Amino acid sequence: MSNQPRHIAIIMDGNGRWATAQGKSRTYGHERGAETVRAITTYCARHSDIDRLSLYAFSTENWKRPKIEVEFLMKLLERYLKSECSTYLEGNIRFEPIGDLSLFSKSLRKIINDVQNATANCNGLVQSLALNYGSRDEIVRAINALRNEESITEESLSNALDCTHDIDLLIRTGGDHRLSNFLLWQAAYAELFFTDTLWPEFTADELETIIKKFKTVERRFGGLN
């Protein structure tokens, strides 16, 4: 019941709208969004009281976007992981993907696996990218993995999920007020913060302001003081 968020999750929304407002292509917005990922991850890594940062990078529904945009996002993810591996190691950051990676290309899966293995011994911040992730899909896969069990409990189901850690603070940028199928089980008792700031303009200063507000919240988890 600590007032310090140990696990922060962010729905990174607004890349395309930000780029359109700048008169740029949506792909430009995604590139700028990747820079924000680096800045926010670096901020969290410097604060030892933050254990995990989970970022919604590519959802199971994002495949519905135009083919050219999806292809760009796959290439951007490859470039990001290749370039950020050194940043992970320098910052003692462990990379852990969540989601169904089976639909990605063999080369992308290899890069994801290589970065995960390279950072496996890092014991600072854990940065978790949700890739081809949907919470309902995650829960269904977990249930199928447990279907031969005599009974399924909250604990066993939680341990079978891609992400086994409850969220303290969940933030969504971009002005919308919904969870969009992101970590629904893990967010059961999360504090939700929504900001109109589009993801490319989201800063460590704004994150710090949100964390300060979070610390003033009385978290009772269904109980009383």
Image (tube, rainbow, N blue to C red):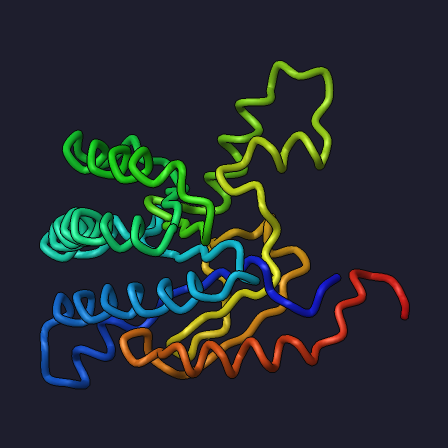
Q: Residue furthest front?
A: 90
Q: Residue furthest right?
A: 224
Looking at the picture, does residue 39 appear above or below residue 74? Answer: below
Query: Residue 143 at what x, y percent from top left?
Result: 57, 28
Looking at the picture, does residue 141 appear above or below residue 81? Answer: above
Looking at the picture, does residue 115 appear above or below residue 93? Answer: above
Q: Place residue 154 in its image quadrant.
A: top right
| Quadrant holding the N terminus | bottom right
Q: How many marks?
A: 0
Q: Place residue 20 in its image quadrant.
A: bottom left
**Residue located at (48% from left, 54% from top):** 182
**Residue located at (17% from left, 52% from top):** 83
**Residue located at (70% from left, 27% from top):** 152
In this rendering, would 114 be left or right of 178?
left
In this rendering, would 158 be left or right of 50?
right
Query: Residue 90 at what x, y percent from top left?
Result: 30, 53
Q: Place residue 216 in its image quadrant.
A: bottom right
Q: Nearer the viewer, residue 215 or 103?
A: 215
**Residue located at (46% from left, 45% from top):** 123
Looking at the picture, does residue 216 appear above or below residue 34? Answer: below
| Quadrant holding the C terminus | bottom right
Query: Residue 133 at what x, y percent from top left?
Result: 39, 45
In this rendering, would 161 be left or right of 94?
right
Query: Residue 53 at what x, y percent from top left?
Result: 46, 57
